[in-house]
């Protein structure tokens, strides 16, 4: 009897993977077909859509003729298709990734990279300097942006698709190499990159120097143009370095690896001296921490410094050069001492030399259709963490520091190279599996179309006025007073139809598709 029970359990255990695999494969195909056929615009994607797909919007783009090039937009969806292709071998997913890459080709600027959006309306495209349209003469804006991983992540998508296609798709291959070659020309003599560019810089204006503290700095935003600053903000330079390391692997071009190592040299130059041996968000040509936007003061940053330490360890893994690892030790010890009580948060901005946390006071923001936006108060530097801006993290997480410490201590004992194939947009995570999650739960959450629908709201296309409330106020409608609380947002839309309360997020599609692919056990 016992033997029969054991045999029955073994038979059930053996049968389960085959049945589950078919269910997972079916769910992946259903969700991807919906996203490709019903959601995409010529292979590109927004962050978020209403559940009926009548409206899509991202941070910078909106509507049916535009798509987004950053974060939860086109590149990450394309990369999720690549994960599914590698897990299943089903050409459907590679073709879907190719369409996302071709959307990128259509949005490549004459300056070599990408802006935040890609416009597909033929009439509106005439206003953009898109290489695919040959519209490069007399167009000055927008420039290529390296902010928020925009151009770097698009290059990663193109490179990875190019490799899967054996470098035989001429438009994708050429666009990837054009971007990589062009971005080499805008690297500063010291190895840094700007946040945005339209043409190569005049190298004579940017001498090679080590970082130092300025004698003094203004507590008020000077309103200067910061686009030529050496910029770590949002990990821009770290992403450039890792992009070029991966490009060197994929194309076997030593120029790309050399650019990454030159970028690593800039990180070493930019490390601040004691008492704050970490990094600023951005530096001027004198290698002093400098202002950028009105909520980004000269300071040492507890946020981007964490990403910089991670890319230094990547450089050590890739090159074996101990100088990269040695720079991590003092920075890590300093940042560990700067963590706020509770151990989970660290100031994004720490005052030069004093190390006091700097905060930016909250301000009321007004946007009106056709009139742009305005901030009518706030945005002052403060040492007080009361009433600070919420749209930008002046306090950031410190959860990465223990992990950085663990990796640093391990690398001091033994250097381990990264795997050949990298995943996602932060390849220092490339040696980790995607979190698998509960495949059955993911599948059950899908609707009949193959969509994952969530509670939420993205507004409507016809927004007339938006007001972010920095402190308690009162709104009146025909004399009727309505209290409005701090951090509330008031929005006025044209027409009687209210915004829909159900949404579809590209980030959720990506996460679920990657988790289902990982649940297949693809051997990574």
Image: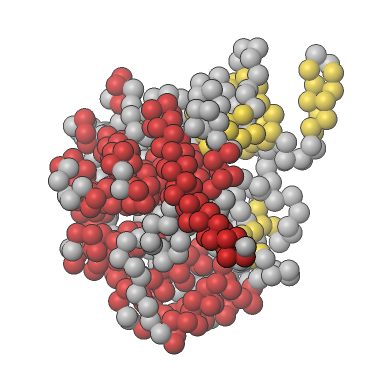
Q: Is residue 278 above or below residue 84?
A: below
Q: Is residue 334 above or below residue 434?
A: below
- Residue 66 in view of the camera: no
Of residues 482 and 176, the one nearer the viewer is 176
- Residue 133 in view of the camera: yes
Of residues 283 and 429, the one nearer the viewer is 429
Residue drawn at x 65%, y 71% as measured from the top left: 339
Residue drawn at x 55%, y 31% as measured from the top left: 447
Q: Is residue 262 above or below residue 448?
A: below
For residue 324, what is the image quadrant?
bottom left
For the N terminus, the quadrant is bottom right
Q: Position of residue 72 (x, y in %)?
A: 47, 43
Q: Is residue 265 above or below residue 523?
A: below
Q: Position of residue 451 (x, y in %)?
A: 51, 32
Of residues 519 and 487, the one nearer the viewer is 519
For the C terminus, the quadrant is bottom left
What is the basis of the colouring in this image? Answer: secondary structure
What residue occupies the far bottom of the structure in this picture? Answer: 413
156 on left or right of 383? left
Q: How many marks?
A: 0
Q: Position of residue 488 (x, y in %)?
A: 73, 36
406 on left or right of 316? right
Of residues 436 and 172, the one nearer the viewer is 436
Residue drawn at x 21%, y 30% as measured from the top left: 133
Q: Position of residue 93 (x, y in %)?
A: 33, 41
Residue drawn at x 15%, y 46% as measured from the top left: 168
For residue 75, what is the image quadrant?
top left
What residue occupies the far front of the structure in this picture? Answer: 1
């Amino acid at each position: 009897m016992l033997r029969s029970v054991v045999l029955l359990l073994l038979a059930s255990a053996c049968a389960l993977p085959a049945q589950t695999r078919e269910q997972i494969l079916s769910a992946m195909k259903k969700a991807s077909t919906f996203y490709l056929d019903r959601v995409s615009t010529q292979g590109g994607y927004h962050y978020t859509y209403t559940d009926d797909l009548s409206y899509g919007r991202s941070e910078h783009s909106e509507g049916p003729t535009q798509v987004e090039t950053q974060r939860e937009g086109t590149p990450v969806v394309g990369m999720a298709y690549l994960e599914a292709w590698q897990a299943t071998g089903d050409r459907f997913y590679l073709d879907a990734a190719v369409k996302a890459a071709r959307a990128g080709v259509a949005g490549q600027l004459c300056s070599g990279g990408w802006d935040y959006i890609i416009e597909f309306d033929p009439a509106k495209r005439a206003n953009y300097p898109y290489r695919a349209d040959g519209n490069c003469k007399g167009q000055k804006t927008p420039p290529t942006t390296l902010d928020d991983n925009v151009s770097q992540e698009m290059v990663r998508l193109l490179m990875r698709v190019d490799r899967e296609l054996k470098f035989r798709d001429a438009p994708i291959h050429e666009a990837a190499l054009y971007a990589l070659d062009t971005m080499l020309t805008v690297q500063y003599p010291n190895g840094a990159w700007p946040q945005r560019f339209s043409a190569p810089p005049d190298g004579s204006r940017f001498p090679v120097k080590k970082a130092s503290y300025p004698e003094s700095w203004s507590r008020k935003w000077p309103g200067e143009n910061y686009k030529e600053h050496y910029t770590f903000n949002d990990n821009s330079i770290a992403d450039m370095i890792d992009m070029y390391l991966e490009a060197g692997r994929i194309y076997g071009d030593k120029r790309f690896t050399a650019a990454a190592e030159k970028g690593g040299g800039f990180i070493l130059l930019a490390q601040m001296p004691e008492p704050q041996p970490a990094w600023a968000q951005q530096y001027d040509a004198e290698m002093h921490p400098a202002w950028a936007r009105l909520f980004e003061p000269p300071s040492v940053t507890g946020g981007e410094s964490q990403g910089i330490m991670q890319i230094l360890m990547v450089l050590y893994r890739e090159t074996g050069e101990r100088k990269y690892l040695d720079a991590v030790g003092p920075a890590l010890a300093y940042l560990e001492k700067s963590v706020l009580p509770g151990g989970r948060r660290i100031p994004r901005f720490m005052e030069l030399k004093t190390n006091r946390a700097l905060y930016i006071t909250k301000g009321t923001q007004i946007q009106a259709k056709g009139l742009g936006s305005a901030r009518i108060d706030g945005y002052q530097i403060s040492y007080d963490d009361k009433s600070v801006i919420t749209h930008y993290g002046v306090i950031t997480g410190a959860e990465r520091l223990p992990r950085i410490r663990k990796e640093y201590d391990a690398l001091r004992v033994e250097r381990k190279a990264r795997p050949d194939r990298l995943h996602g947009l932060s390849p220092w995570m490339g040696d980790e599996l995607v979190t698998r999650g509960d495949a059955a739960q993911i599948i059950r959450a899908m609707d009949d179309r193959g969509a994952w629908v969530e509670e939420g709201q993205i507004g409507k296309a016809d927004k007339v006025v938006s007001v972010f409330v920095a402190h308690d106020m009162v709104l009146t409608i025909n004399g009727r007073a309505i209290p409005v609380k701090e951090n509330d947002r008031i929005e006025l839309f044209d027409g009687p139809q209210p915004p829909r309360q159900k949404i579809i997020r590209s980030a959720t599609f990506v996460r679920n598709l990657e988790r289902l692919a990982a649940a297949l056990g693809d051997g990574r």
